[in-house]
Image (cartoon, rainbow, N blue to C red):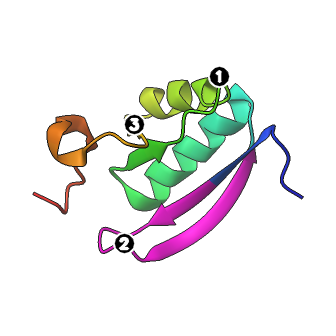
Amino acid sequence: MERKKDCKACIMNSDGSIAEESMYNNTLDEAEIFAYSMVKKYGKCVAVCESTANLWLKTYEAFERHGIGVCQTGESFENKGYCRSKNKD
């Protein structure tokens, strides 16, 4: 069951198809484990996060530590160099 302290993730390929869906507990440790596993599995990654109060801060911190570019929903990918996927160029 999804709770507010859980983060839901949808991992998409560069063509927009869903590669996998996952959840992790909204703690810095769990966000670090998730970020590490995504980089290990997929290589260079870009994340789009919904900023829901301050719940996204742990995810943002963990993703930044692992070199995952982070955009908030509503930001334009074309206007943010760090939000472009390596396959879009």
Q: Amino acid at mark 1?
A: Asn
- Asked if labels 2 and 1 touch by Cβ distance under 8 angstroms, the answer is no
Q: Main secondary structure of the magenta part?
A: strand
Q: Which residue is mark 3?
A: 70
Report which quarter residue 71 is drawn in: top left
* Image location of residue 45, percent across then percent down: 37, 50
Residue span colored magenta: 9-24
Amino acid at circle 3:
Val
Sequence-first disc among 1 and 2: 2
Query: Which one is nearer the viewer's eye here, 82 or 29?
Result: 82
Residue 60 vertical position relative to residue 11 in the rendered view, above or below: above
Label 2 sits on residue: 16
Please state if 17 lies on the left or on the right of 14 as rendered. Answer: right
> Is residue 35 toward the left or the right of residue 81 in the image?
right
Question: Marks 1/2: CA distance?
Answer: 28 Å
Is 43 drawn above or below residue 12 in the view shown? above
Image disc number at residue 38: none
The residue mark sitting in front, 3 or 1, is: 1
CA gap, disc 3 and disc 2: 17 Å
Quadrant of residue 1 within the rendered picture: bottom right
- The residue type indicated by label 2 comes to Gly
Rendered residue at 50%/62% (across/down): 11
Q: Residue at 20% x, 55% y: name it.
A: 86
Q: Say whether residue 10 is magenta.
A: yes
- Mark 3, Cα crowd under 10 Å, few <14 / some 14-19 / many 20+, is some
Q: Nearer the viewer, residue 4 or 81?
A: 4
Name the residue beneath numbered marker 1. 54
Count the marks: how many? 3
Q: Going from the N terminus, do you reach mark 3 or mark 2 first?
A: 2
Q: Quadrant of the C terminus?
A: bottom left
Please, what secondary structure does the residue beneath circle 2 have?
A: loop
Q: CA distance from mark 3 to mark 1?
A: 15 Å
